[in-house]
Every structure is written in structure tokens, then in C-alpha cells.
Amino acid sequence: MLKGLLTVTAGLIIAGAGGCASDKPHEYGEQRPDPSSLDAGGGLQSKDLLASTDQLVRDLLAEPKLNASKEKWTIVVEKIENHTTQSYFNYEIFSRRFGTLLQRQGGDRVALIENKARFHKVQNQELEHGGDNFGEGAPAGNAAGIQPDYALTGRVDELRNAATSTYRLEFQVLSMRTREILWTNEYIVKAAR
């Protein structure tokens, strides 16, 4: 009887301890801060990524020239130029998110065209003969795809002071035929270093 009582008591203790355990970390909610919040660090942050690309895509999609166009705008997203004091830093996350939002929100008004170098790299890796005979009945060399009418270019500039930096992100839509800049806008933020 005593042996049975000890076994039941031990089982209850083990079950109780197991019930308190969780597969979630102790500070689960604090490990993933909201990307729209600022942390104590300096420089451009996730909040700037979200705010700038949201604002600039809304502005581009409201552009009267785009909305008056009877044809879909075919746009290639170019690499973003870094003109900050940290020239090694890659700001591609801004242009890539801009392109993603533009594709998703642009509907039938815009079509993103892959960058030529990346397109040919993937084509050469994945298609026989580098895509020279792409599609049935297509003549050799007809693998260029759609030619973009516009390029989305971007750059990041920095004005550095003693304890802060002011960042300026600028995006432009450039006509590939006329070199005309059809749209441009900027996002400016001051951050501690």
C-alpha cells in the first residue's frame, strides 16, 4: 500500500512538473520585437525599411503618368547605390522590398522585369544551351525576354554629424528610351550613431 502510494505521488509530481514545462522560451514575446519599432542602436533600422518603402510605393502608384498610361509599365529594379560612410553596407533590402510591394500592389498597371544579368545567369544555369532555343519554334537568341520600358533606381546618402547621421533614400523611375525621370521621391530620417 505504501509502495503504491509512493508510486502515485511520484507520478503526480512528474506530471505536474511536465505540465509546467513549455516548448516556448521563457521570454518568447521579447525575443521578436515588432519590426516597426526602434531599438537603441543607430543607423537605418527595420522601421525605416517599412516606412520608406510603404510611403514611396504609395506615391509611385498614385503618379498621374502611371495611372494615365494605357500600357502596363514594365520596370526593372536596379541595385541601390550606397553613398554613405559605410560604403560596404548592402542596402538591397530597400530596393527588393520596394519591388515586392510594387508588384503586389500595382495590379495590372506594372510588371517587374528581372535584371538582365540575373536573368541570364539563371537562364544559363537552368536551361539547355543557355536558353538559346527557348520555347518551341523560337529562333536562336530569342531568349532575351521582355525589354523593360523603365528602370527603378535608388541611392542612399548620408550626412554625418558628431553624434547623428541623416540618411536620404531616393528612388527614381527612369525611361529606358528617353532617359527622362518620370517619377522621383525621397525618404529622410535622422538617426543616432
Image (cartoon, rainbow, N blue to C red):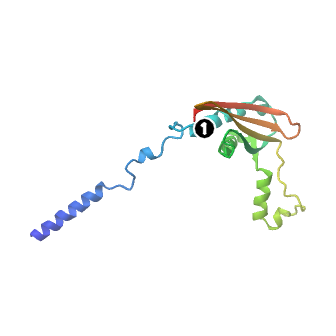
Q: At 65% across and 37% down in the image, what residue appears?
A: 53
Q: In the figure, residue 58 lies in which quadrant?
A: top right
Q: Is residue 72 left or right of 9 when viewed as pictured? A: right
Q: At 87% across and 58% down in the image, what residue appears?
A: 142
Q: Is residue 132 left or right of 163 when viewed as pictured? A: right
Along the viewing direction, whichever of 40 and 149 lies nearer the viewer? 40
Q: Quarter of the image containing the C terminus?
A: top right
Q: Quarter of the image containing the N terminus?
A: bottom left
User: Which residue is labeled 1 in the image?
Assistant: 44
Along the viewing direction, whichever of 90 and 138 lies nearer the viewer? 90
As helix, strand or loop, the secondary structure at mark 1 comes to: loop
View extreme (front): residue: 162
View extreme (right): residue: 139
x and y, in percent, of residue 175 in the image: 84, 38
Along the viewing direction, whichever of 174 and 85 lies nearer the viewer? 85
- Count the labels in the image: 1
Q: Amino acid at mark 1?
A: Leu
Q: Is residue 152 left or right of 45 when viewed as pictured? A: right
Q: In the figure, residue 186 lies in which quadrant?
A: top right
Q: Is residue 88 left or right of 173 when viewed as pictured? A: left
x and y, in percent, of residue 123 in the image: 78, 60
View extreme (left): residue: 1
Q: In the figure, residue 143 lies in which quadrant?
A: bottom right
x and y, in percent, of residue 31 in the image: 45, 47
Q: At 21% across and 61% down in the image, what residue appears?
A: 12
10 Å crowding of disc 1: few (<14), some (14-19), many (20+): some
Q: At 65% across and 30% down in the image, what residue appears?
A: 188
x and y, in percent, of residue 68 in the image: 79, 31
